Amino acid sequence: MSVFGVAERLRSSPAQAWTLCFVAFAISLAARFLFDDMLPAGFPYLTFFPAVILTAFFAGLWPGIACAVLCGLSAWYWFIPPFNSFHVNHQSFIALLFYACIVSVDILLIQLMHGATEGLRAERAVTRELYDQQREMVAQLKDREERQQVLQNELSHRMKNTLAMVQAVVGQSLRHAPDLKTASDTVSARILALGRSQDMLTQSNWQSADIRSIIEASLVPHVDHPGRFQVDGDPIELNATQSMGLALMLHELATNAAKYGALSTDSGTVGIAWKRREERHFELTWSESGGPVVVTPTRRGFGSRLIERVVPGYFQGTTSVDYRPEGLQATLTGVVESQTV
């Protein structure tokens, strides 16, 4: 610890500061008596000056002034003629005036030095704080730039995935459509289904979407009365690709049901149920009832391949379609990559 550190510690403790004052005075007085015979005449304050200086430096202003007064009175009484009295004459007045000027200048310089030191310490603290703030700002700026780069990469990745899915949907729809009007209607409907799933993902910052929200958004165009769909299942979060894939699958199933199945009649209903299995596996079932008798199709279009081959790939699973006479049933099994809630 530096001498300024020791002085600061003593100054902060009044008991230690005043103890130092009296101890310094006692030592200087004893030393003056001890060396009285050795000192030449005219030096009554020789041992008192160090005591005043040290006390003012280490103990502070008021202990320093007190030590100076005690030392001055002691020198006046015992070491300035006439001895053992406080008699004032020309000689004693000059000696006292000299002493007062010297100790006043000493104490003043010491206080100015301590003030300058405290000012320097305060400036150093401000400089350190400014440095810390600047370093924090630089770190925040760097972090912001990194996040911006991540967002740009993520946006590019999502746009590529979306465009790839749209390209596949448009290409397959045009390839299997009998005419341009049918192709246009099919492409528009499928892109709208993708759009509804993206709306769900946007609400969750494109991280994941609840499976119920995806299902309900996909079925909105086909809900013509409250009992048309029965939806039931555990809360499950799907990632972006799985959400869009499931939306396309539900769109195809609902479109087929509206044309040929349960949704083509007023009394037809559709049940959609899903459940979690071991670990991250799940199972979703689409069950139609109350519609016309189901006939197994002789031709498989893009919609069937989308349901049975494309979408299961997003879930690392499979889709089975059962053309039961009483109503079509499709079962999707797979793995969800987002956490269940």
Image: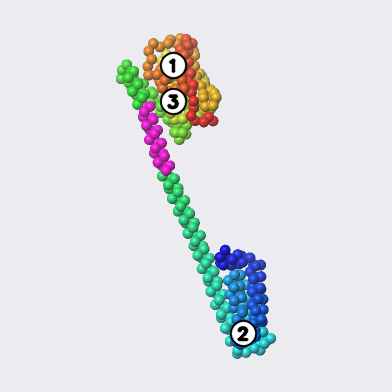
Chain-order first, disc 2 or disc 1: 2
Residue 301 in picture, x, y percent from top left: 37, 16
Depth check, front residue: 3 or 53: 3
Q: Mark 1 packing: few (<14 Cα in 10 Å), some, or many (20+)?
A: many
How many numbered dots are placed on residues in this image? Answer: 3
Residue tagged by mark 1? 257
Determine the CA span between mark 1 and mark 3.
23 Å
Q: Do we see residue 213 in this rendering?
A: no
> Which corner quadrant holds the C terminus?
top right
Residues drawn in magenta: 146-166
Determine the CA span between mark 3 and mark 2.
104 Å
| Circle 1: element type | helix
Question: In percent of the image, x 54 and y 23: which residue is there?
Answer: 277
User: Does residue 262 sit above or below 192 in this rendering?
Assistant: above
Give the farthest residue toward the front: 38
Residue 333 in picture, x, y percent from top left: 49, 21
User: The residue under label 2 is which amino acid type?
Assistant: Leu
Q: Do we see residue 282 in this rendering?
A: yes
Depth check, front residue: 313 or 162: 313
User: Magenta span: helix, strand or loop, mainly?
Assistant: helix
Question: In percent of the image, x 56 and y 65: which residue is there?
Answer: 2
| Circle 2: element type | loop
Question: In percent of the image, x 58 and y 75: which residue is there?
Answer: 53
